[in-house]
């Protein structure tokens, strides 16, 4: 298949100079082996839209990824993102060579952050990792708070009745959540009210949106990795990230 014809089939809006550049890149990748790593891919996506929708100025990236999928080449492309492209699932389902790896965060043996902040009560460090989902940045901000406010005593910090979100962490979460649509914010607020995982059918039944809109919104939240799903008997259960649950509860 000719590269130019393939790209033009996807979009008639791509200018000839962009086509030439993309074809040149792919011709080079067909000839040589490259490892290409694109970090913070989510910055290409629009805010206040469901996850994975490209900004109009960055549509060429979407065409490039499709070309990478369809054209034979010797190179490897690694995409790092806080949310999945809206069309990524279809590419992954079609090719065994396309894989998605979800990073689960730090494990209990990765304690350098706590050592750097000279935290005490080492037996509780695993609890801290689990509470904050192993997120290195969240743990760094929380470790700073524990050192400054609780004199490094993790036990004293964990004795608090509710999960503590320091102001620095709250600001980080606020900025990240600004990307959400209004429907996503409403669904997150509803999910945060529950003390346990929620059945998918239950949240759809309670939602003020149509079934289709509710499902699309929940799917978007899973692409952002804010929600995870599992099956229990014949039901699908939704798990809301506990840090996000604590944040939304603090807003109520």
Image (cartoon, rainbow, N blue to C red):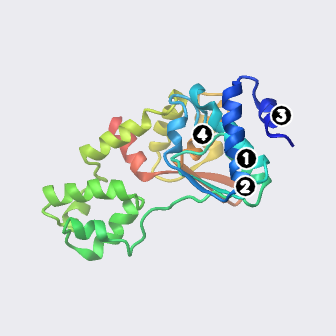
Mark 4–mark 2 distance (CA, rounded to whole Å): 37 Å
Q: Which residue is mark 4?
A: 220
In the rendered view, tell whether residue 83 sits above or below residue 185: below
In the rendered view, tell whether residue 136 sits above or below residue 60: below
Q: In front of the other: label 1 or label 3? A: 1
Label 4: state its secondary structure: helix
Whether pointer 3 and pointer 2 mark residues with C-beta atoms closer than 8 Å, the reply is: no
Label 3: state its secondary structure: helix
Q: Residue at x 27, y 53 (%)?
A: 141
In depth, the one of 215 and 181 nearer the eye is: 181
Q: Which residue is mark 3?
A: 5
Q: Residue 162: where, in percent of width, then height?
A: 30, 53
Q: Residue 240: where, in percent of width, then height?
A: 50, 49
Whether pointer 2 and pointer 1 mark residues with C-beta atoms closer than 8 Å, the reply is: yes
Q: In front of the other: label 3 or label 4? A: 3
Neighbours of disc 2 within 10 Å: few (<14), some (14-19), many (20+): few
Mark 1–mark 3 distance (CA, rounded to whole Å): 14 Å
Q: Which of the two labelled residues, at mark 3 and mark 4, occupies the earlier sequence position?
A: 3
Mark 3–mark 2 distance (CA, rounded to whole Å): 20 Å
Query: Which quarter of the rendering shows the N terminus?
Result: top right
Q: Which of the two labelled residues, at mark 1 and mark 3, occupies the earlier sequence position?
A: 3
Q: Residue 164: where, in percent of width, then height?
A: 28, 51
Q: Which mark is residue 31?
A: 2
Neighbours of disc 1 within 10 Å: few (<14), some (14-19), many (20+): some
Q: Which residue is mark 1?
A: 27
Instruction: Write down the quadrant of residue 146 in the picture.
Output: bottom left
Instruction: Write down the quadrant of residue 102 in the picture.
Output: bottom right
């Amino acid at each position: 298949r000719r590269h130019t014809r393939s790209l033009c089939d996807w979009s008639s809006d791509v200018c000839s100079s962009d086509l030439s550049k993309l074809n040149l890149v792919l011709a080079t990748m067909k000839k040589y082996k490259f490892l290409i790593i694109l970090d913070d891919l989510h910055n290409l996506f629009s805010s206040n839209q469901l996850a994975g929708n490209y900004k109009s100025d960055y549509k060429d990236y979407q065409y490039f990824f499709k070309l990478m999928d369809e054209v034979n080449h010797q190179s490897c492309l690694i995409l790092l993102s806080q949310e999945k492209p809206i069309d990524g699932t279809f590419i992954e389902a079609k090719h065994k060579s396309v894989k998605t790896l979800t990073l689960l965060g730090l494990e209990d043996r990765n304690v350098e952050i706590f050592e750097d902040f000279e935290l005490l009560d080492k037996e509780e460090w695993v609890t801290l990792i689990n509470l904050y989902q192993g997120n290195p940045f969240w743990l760094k901000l929380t470790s700073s708070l524990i050192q400054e406010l609780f004199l490094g005593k993790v036990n004293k910090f964990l004795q608090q009745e509710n999960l503590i979100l320091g102001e620095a962490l709250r600001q980080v979460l606020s900025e990240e959540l600004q990307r959400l649509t209004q429907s996503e914010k409403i669904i997150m607020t509803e999910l945060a009210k529950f003390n346990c995982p929620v059945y998918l059918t239950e949240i759809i039944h309670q939602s003020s949106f149509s079934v289709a809109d509710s499902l699309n919104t929940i799917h978007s939240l899973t692409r952002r990795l804010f929600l995870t799903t599992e099956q229990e008997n014949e039901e699908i259960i939704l798990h809301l990230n506990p840090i996000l649950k604590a944040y939304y509860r603090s807003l109520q």
